[in-house]
Every structure is written in C-alpha cells, then in structure tokens.
Image: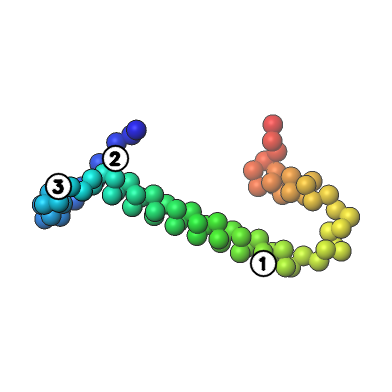
Amino acid sequence: MPTVSVRVPDELKARMDAHTTINWSAVLRESIRRELDEREGRRLARAVAINERLRAQIEPDDVADQNTAELIRTWRDRRRGPAE
C-alpha cells in the first residue's frame, strides 16, 4: 500500500496525540474515501442530468432511421481522431 504524508500544525498534532486509541491513518483513509465518493457521485449525477436534458431534445422520429452507433463513432473520431 502506498504511503501518503500529511502535514498538520503542531497544535493539531498535540490534540491528536492526546487520543491514543484513535487510528488516525484509518480516519484519514475514510475521510479521503468519502470525499472522493462524494465528488465522483456529483460528477455522475451531472452527467446523468446532461444526458436526460439532451435526450429530451431529441425527437424519436428524427433518429428512427439512423445508425446511432455509427453517429457516436463519427463524433468520437472528430474529438479524438480515428481509432487505430
């Protein structure tokens, strides 16, 4: 497992040292995990909202005869260049 170092002010470290039964590494790991979960969840929620907004703008009859997979490939290639 990789090591991550964290600097804290002396006063905070003294307060932490007063609580010898607390596993501060576990506390920090959990805090980091929660922060990442929250941020990634917000990103997913935003992507879903954008998708729903765009979907609402599409008329099903306008795309009924289109190959949507091919359309997606075309736009992806425009953004990133063709796959090799």
User: Residue 68 placed where, x, y %?
Assistant: 79, 51
Give above or below for 3 relative to 18.
above
Q: Are marks 2 and 3 in contact (CB under 8 Å)?
A: no
**Residue type indicated by callout 3:** Thr
Left/right placement of residue 74 relative to residue 52 reads right
The image quarter containing residue 26 is: top left
Mark 1 belongs to which amino acid?
Arg
- Reply above or below: 33 against 60: above
Q: Residues within 10 Å of mark 3 (few under 14, many from 20)?
A: few
State which quadrant residue 46 falls in.
bottom right
Q: Residue at x 81, y 66 (%)?
A: 59
Residue 7, disc: none
Give the residue type at disc 2.
Answer: Val
Residue drawn at x 33%, y 46% is 29
Q: Would you say 80 lies left or right of 74 here?
A: left
Q: Is residue 3 left or right of residue 55?
A: left
Residue at the outermost front position = 21
When the figure is inspected, residue 62 is found, relative to residue 1, above or below; the finding is below
> Under tag 1, what secondary structure?
helix
Instruction: Return the mark for residue 53.
Output: 1
Q: Which residue is mark 3?
A: 20
Look at the image and tell me in which quarter the N terminus lies: top left
Q: Residue at x 55, y 61 (%)?
A: 45
